[in-house]
Structure formats: C-alpha cells, structure tokens
Amino acid sequence: MAIQLNHKFYPNKVSTKEQTRLSGEKAVIDTVSPNFLELTPFLSVCIPTYNRGHMLPAAIESVITQDFDNFELIICDNASTDNTEEVVKDYTDKRIRYVRYPTLVSMYANHNRCIELARGNWIIFLHSDDRINNLKSAQLILESLPSGVSACFPYRGAKEINLPTYQEWNFLEILQLMNGISPSGSIYQKDALDKQGGFAEDNIIADWEILLNMAWSRGLVYSYSSEPFVTRVVHGKNAYLKSIKDGTAHLGKSHCIKRLFADVSFNDFKKIINLIILQGAASKISLLYFYLLISGLDEKAEWFKKEAINLNKFSLLSAGSVYGILVKIMGRENFWRFYQKIRQIA
C-alpha cells in the first residue's frame, strides 16, 4: 500500500543526509566473482553497515570462523565515509561479497539491498556492531521448524535453555511486542521477504512491521530461544534503542497500522476485527485501539472500541486505553509532544 504520512513527528529518515533509494541503482564496488557465484548457500548472512569500520572486523570474524560453512556473507556498505572499504579488503575469504553503494539511504533501504543480493533460501541479518556466536544452530533451528514458516526471530523475553524452544506468534501477539524483537539475528525466508516487497524503507522499526505483515497474510512467524545466538553490542548510536527511548517506535507502529487498515473496507474491517477480538487479551485489544486512533482512523477506532467493550475485551486501565483518551483530549500532535517529553525524563 502506498500510504504517506504527513506527520512532522514521524522520523522517515534517521539522518537528514539520507536519500530515497532509486530503482536500478548501481554499486560502485562489488567483489563478486565467478567462484562466489558457483556457491549455492543454505544461508545468506547479511551485514548492512554504515561507518562501522572500527566494529566490522569482529562481526566478520564471528561469521567466517564458524564450524558451519554453507553460507555466503554479504556486506552492504551504505556509502560509508570511514575506513570500511579498507577494513573489508583485508579479508580474502571467498564466501565474502562486499558491495559498496554511492548513495546514503535509510537503514532498511540498505537491508533491502542485501535481500536483492542474497542467493540463499534463508537470510540472517547481522548488524555490523554485533557478533554471531553459533551459525550451525541456525540450520538446526530452521530444520526443526514446521514447514511454511516465513520468519524466525530471537526473542529476548524467552528463557534460555539448552535445547532450542519455539513459539508461534499471531498478529495480536506481535502487535504487543516492543522490546522483545531483536532485528540482528532474525532469520527470514527469502521468498517470503520478496513477496512482502522487502522492508518498509521509511520505518525505523520495519523489522517489526514485516513480521506483523507476515502474520497478517497468514504466514507462520516463530521466535526461538536457545543458546545465545547473537551477541548484541549496546552503545550510544544504536538506532533501535533510541527509537524505544524517544517514542518513535510507537510512531512506526502507527504508520504500519495505517498501511494495513486505511484501504480496507468497513465491512472487511469488521470481519477481521471480530476475529482479532476473539483471540486477543483485553490489554492487547486496547493497544490496537490506540494505534488505530493515532493513525487517524478515528471511525474504525471507535467502532473497534465499542465492539471490544460489548465483548468484555477492552481494558479501560491499560496503557492503550489511557493513551487513546489523551489523544482525544490533546490531539495527535500535542500528544506526541507530551509523550516524547515524558520518554526523555524516564
């Protein structure tokens, strides 16, 4: 859906220097070779990177030193201005493909470049400031899952045990998630990503949005918990953590909800929502009401709230309900000003 939000608080770009990715863009460096293309990897490990030359070696070495070798490693350089190119040139491993683009685009636009280059049936994203601990476990995880799974993400809220454990997530459960999803280490079926058209390039939490869309379109979405698969390095420039802190993750969610529901007829909306209400807990139901309201879908939001109340599936004391009341009292723009100030204090 081509929905545009003209909301001045919505962070379409992390940096004002970012440009819109153009179709048919050409890389200025691509180290692909005939030997590389002869590989038919089970996994494509993709490292999208920008100005992380000082952190990149640890990420690369965590991949190429694994005892599992049925993979390709794609490093997608988003027009870095540091020594990233020189760092990657030091590696001669034939499984590595380094591709550098001349234009700085959004983080998830660079992820989409990775998807287009990947040749494996499965894609694992590894952020350039993180490290993979056990790549072999990814194969074991994927071979243990039911057929038809579109994506499998590491859920930090799950208890770590010795053997992999899995959990299926439906639309409402993914909607409720905020801090639990780790983009780095998430595994996607390439065909499923292609069907979704890749990540939404204008959303800071596009990883969450694509899982929601996959669940919405009846694709199976699972989480896994096993030995720590990815070590995440937390630092001040982590865009995901920043989005949680300043509230822009909520804005990203509202953007996604608008894309999902804006063009759905009211009759179809009612059928869909009745199914959601029946399967959801009251706290999750009220959160969806808030997202519908903040997305500007007022009529659908109010019908949804009334229906949920009639079925005793709406919590007046939940965060979603309270946020919704504040939006109606303050207006959308004033609410976001207020919310961002509160998040800065917290």
Image: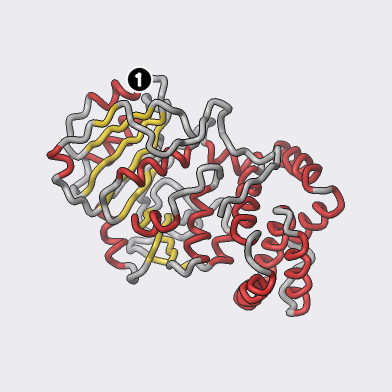
| Residue 15, placed above or below residue 173 | above
Please, what is the three-letter code of the amino acid marked with disc 1?
Answer: Asn
Colouring scheme, one of rainbow, by chain, secondary structure, one colour? secondary structure
Q: Is residue 302 left or right of residue 126?
A: right
* Residue ID at (39%, 43%): 231
Q: Picture coordinates of residue 139 (x, y %)?
A: 26, 58
Which of the 4 image quarters holds residue 290? bottom right
Q: Is residue 142 left or right of residue 283?
A: left
* Residue ID at (41%, 58%): 195
**Residue 319 in view here:** no
User: Which residue is the site of mark 1?
Assistant: 83
Q: Nearer the viewer, residue 183 or 121?
A: 121
Crowding around mark 1 (Cα neighbors within 10 Å: few <14, some 14 to 19, many 20+) is: few
* Residue ID at (38%, 61%): 161
* Residue ID at (75%, 43%): 336
Which part of the image, by quadrant, shows the N terminus? bottom right
| Residue 64, placed above or below residue 101 | below
Q: Picture coordinates of residue 30 (x, y %)?
A: 26, 31
Q: Is residue 32 left or right of residue 162?
A: left
Q: Picture coordinates of residue 172 (x, y %)?
A: 58, 66
Which part of the image, by quadrant, shows the C terminus? top right
**Residue 239 in view here:** yes
Q: Which residue is situated farthest in the front direction here?
A: 24
Q: Picture coordinates of residue 134 (x, y %)?
A: 28, 49
Q: Name the secondary structure under disc 1.
A: loop
